[in-house]
Amino acid sequence: MSLIKSISVGNGDMFYIKHESDNFTIIDCCMDETNKDDIVSEIVTESKNKSITRFISTHPDDDHIHGLKELDDKINILNFYCVENKATKEDETEDFKRYCELRDSDKAYYIYKGCSRCWMNENDAEKKYGSSGINILWPITSNEEYKEELKKAKNGESPNNISPIIKYSLQNGVTVLWFGDLENDFMEKIKDEIELPKADIIFAPHHGRSSGKIPKEWLDAIEPKIIVIGEAPSEKINYLSGYNTITQNSAGDIIFDCGTGVVDIYVSNEKYTVNYLKNKYLADKYNGTYIGTLEI
């Protein structure tokens, strides 16, 4: 089994995957004075028995790297994954400076469509640590629209559209997609450039904002069973009528306990419910309330 946690951090994103192999993955960082001690402590505890820990940064906006300096100081990030970029900011925070240090260091591994790396999506020769099941579906670095977004980020404009599309899949189990903060107008431009796989759970781009609405063609191809809508302000959210959703504004932390053919789901808000999951009457755990099971 593996465990995916979407941490409720307010207006931002932070996830981790505790893999069934000897891997631990963190995707993005958003911590402040009110939660950083608890989050860092949890990550240290959950990753302590894993040999390989990686941090994947979708893009260097503050709501995806806030607290990165603190996290790096505490856990010493040795494997930093990001798209190759030269993003700049007019006002450089300490977290952005740390992002740039990691991005430009020998700890960095630059991700792109189809990239392969030992322990990310390849076993090592001795199969000691195993693959994490992570694959990158975007960017295609030769794409002209993408190159233009890299130029904008280098010139200090929004880096939203340099976000990669990340796939995590568990053998005989769940497939999950992340889109970072890709924006609707950019996705419409590149929608014919890539074919997206069917996936069971997806995290809506740009925290679920209408500005991050996924093109219909992509949703038709993905056929998601659950779409997680992030913690954008309610007036800016696209609630995706016609799809099963979990809204993090209401659910709080979301924990996906992924096994063979099933995902048991827990949330930190004990009053949150949905009506589309199978009820296996499981006990509450992970400091969360069981809301049902998704059958794959």
Image (spheres, rainbow, N blue to C red):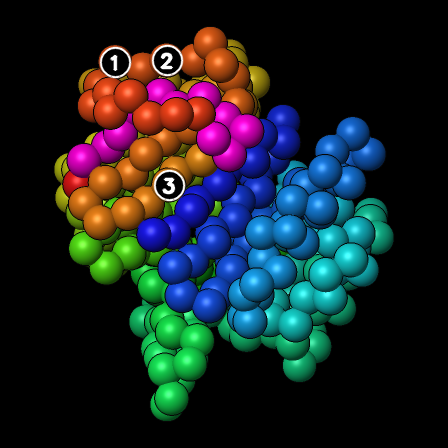
For the residues labelled 3 and 1, the Cα–Cα distance comes to 18 Å
Q: Which residue is mark 2?
A: 273
Residue stretch rendered in magenta on the structure? 285-295
How many angstroms separate mark 2 from mark 1 (CA)? 7 Å
Looking at the rendered structure, the kind of residue marked 3 is: Asp
Q: Disc 2 or 3, which lies upstream in sequence?
A: 3
Q: Determine the residue located farthest toward the bottom in the rendered image.
A: 125
* Residue 5 x %, y %: 49, 41
Name the residue: 51% across, 58% down: 25
Residue at 54%, 70% in the rendered image: 52
User: Would you name the residue on which mark 1 appears?
Assistant: 275
Q: Is residue 160 visible?
A: no
Q: Secondary structure at mark 1?
A: loop
Which residue type does callout 1 highlight? Asn
Cα–Cα span, label 2 and label 3: 17 Å
Mark 2, secondary structure of its residue: loop
Q: Are marks 2 and 1 in contact (CB under 8 Å)?
A: yes
Could you say whether the residue bearing mark 3 is in a helix, strand or loop?
strand
